[in-house]
Amino acid sequence: MTNPRANGLRSVADQSEDERGGPGSILSRQSRDHADLDALMRAYDAEPDADARGRVVAELAERALRHAFAEETVLFPAYRQHLPEQGEELTAHIEGDHQQVNDLLEELQDADPRSPDYDALVRRAFEVIRHDAHDEEDDLLPRLQQVASAEELRAIGAAWEVQRRTAPTRPHPRVPRRPPGNALAAVPLAVTDRVQDAAEHLAGARGARRAAAAGALAAGAVLAVLAARALRRR
Ligand SMILES: [Fe+2]
Ligand SMILES: [Fe+2]
């Protein structure tokens, strides 16, 4: 893999928002979300209580997975379209990292934050997430910037954001990392993930007030599933 600092390109991390194409550009949106992920990783480091650490990891996992899913369905296909010669190698490498993150977060989902192995698993996930952000900010995004207009970068940014908001919230290591497989799976997985999320809230994991909101979400999600089934039967 290219040494990011030796590729002759300016990292997104060293550019102003204007240089990145404005706040809506995919470069700015990625940069902000990477910073939020980094803040959650540092919050984990600063938290001494095991249960609270588990909650930080759950929040980080959801955010990182939605971020990555939207990359796999929107950003990477756009990158391969703009750079058909060199797009394959770099996106295949990053998709491999995303696969590792999905595998590790699936393990962590069922692990006890008080268990001796938990922290080691978290550290491995953090390492891959940080490496992934560097590959994108130092390599993939500056290369895309060279061949796409600011308007195109903003259009990719808007599409990535829409996909991020509606993406599945849980790890799915056995779903393909590329379209059309991941795109086809997105809607049903997003619904089933939210039903599971809501069920966990209802079980009292996150307090009574959030459970009430989750109940409404669960009812909505179940209705959506029933409506989808009814439509399929027609
Ligand atoms: Fe990524
Ligand atoms: Fe990213």
Image: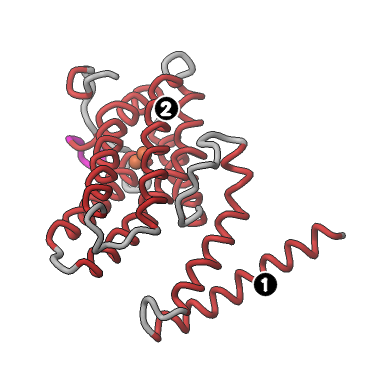
Q: Residues within 10 Å of mark 1 (few under 14, many from 20)?
A: few
Residues 152 and 3: in front is 3
**Is 22 displayed left or right of 216 in the figure?**
left
Q: Residues within 10 Å of mark 2 (few under 14, many from 20)?
A: many
Query: Which residue has dot 1 on it?
Result: 223
Residue 115 has which mark?
none
> Magenta segment, which residues?
14-18
What secondary structure is found at the residue carrying circle 1?
A: helix
Q: Residue at x 12, y 61 (%)?
A: 46
Quadrant of the displayed image that contains ligand 2: top left
- For the residue marked with disc 1, what is the amino acid? Leu
Query: Which residue has dot 2 on it?
Result: 91
- Name, please, the residue furthest toward the right: 234
Residues 37 and 112: in front is 112
Give the x, y percent position of residue 232. Answer: 80, 57
Give the x, y percent position of residue 42. Answer: 16, 55
Magenta segment includes 33: no
Give the x, y percent position of residue 78. Answer: 49, 31
- For the residue marked with disc 2, what is the amino acid? Thr
Give the x, y percent position of residue 75. Answer: 45, 36
Total label count? Answer: 2
Quadrant containing the C terminus in the rendered view: bottom right
Q: Cβ–Cβ below 8 Å for labels 2 and 1?
A: no
- Main SS category, magenta section: loop
Q: Residue at x 62, y 36 (%)?
A: 180
Q: CA distance from mark 2 to mark 1?
A: 37 Å
- Which coloring applies here? secondary structure
What secondary structure is found at the residue carrying circle 2?
A: helix
Q: Residue at x 38, y 31 (%)?
A: 94
Quadrant containing the N terminus in the rendered view: top left
